[in-house]
Amino acid sequence: MDNALLSALVGGLITGIFSIAVSFIQSNKTIAILEERDKTMREELVKLANKVETHNNFGLQLARLETRVDILEKR
C-alpha cells in the first residue's frame, strides 16, 4: 500500500474516532442538563399543584361558611 494512502487512512480514522468521542461526550452532557431541568420542572409542578389544591380547599370552606351564615340569618 502506498505511504500516502496509509497516512490518509490513519489520519481519517483518528479524526473520525475523535469526532465520535466528542459527540458522545457532548450528548451525555446535554442529557444530564435536560434531566436536571426535567427534575426541577417536576418539583415546581408539584409546588404549583399544592398551591392550587390549597386554594381550592379555601374556596370550598368559604362556600360552606357562606351557607352556614345564610342558614343562621334565616333563623
Image (cartoon, grey):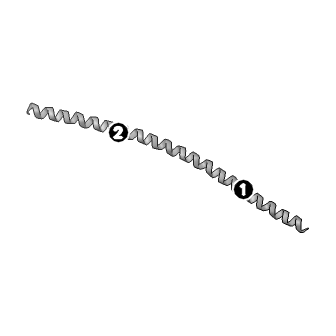
Q: Is residue 18 left or right of residue 62?
A: left
- Residue identifier under label 2: 24
Q: Amino acid at mark 2?
A: Phe
What is the quadrant of the N terminus in the image? top left
Q: Residue at x 24, y 37 (%)?
A: 16
Residue occupying the far front of the picture: 73
> Which residue shows up at 80% across the image and 62% down it?
66
Q: Is residue 58 above or below residue 4?
A: below
Q: Secondary structure at mark 1?
A: helix
Q: Residues within 10 Å of mark 1 (few under 14, many from 20)?
A: few
Depth check: give the residue in front, 13 or 37.
37
Mark 1 or 2, closer to the camera: 1
Dot 1 or dot 2, earlier in sequence: 2
Rendered image quadrant of residue 3? top left
Give the farthest residue toward the right: 75
Where is residue 43? Give x, y as percent.
58, 45
Residue 23 quadrant: top left
**Residue occupying the point 62% across, 52% down:** 49
- The amino acid marked with disc number 1 is Asn
**Residue occupying image coordinates x 69% and y 54%:** 55
Residue highlighted by disc 1? 57
Q: Is residue 61 left or right of residue 46?
A: right
* Residue 59 x %, y %: 73, 58
Q: Position of residue 32 (x, y in %)?
A: 45, 40
Residue 20 shown left or right of residue 69 in the figure? left
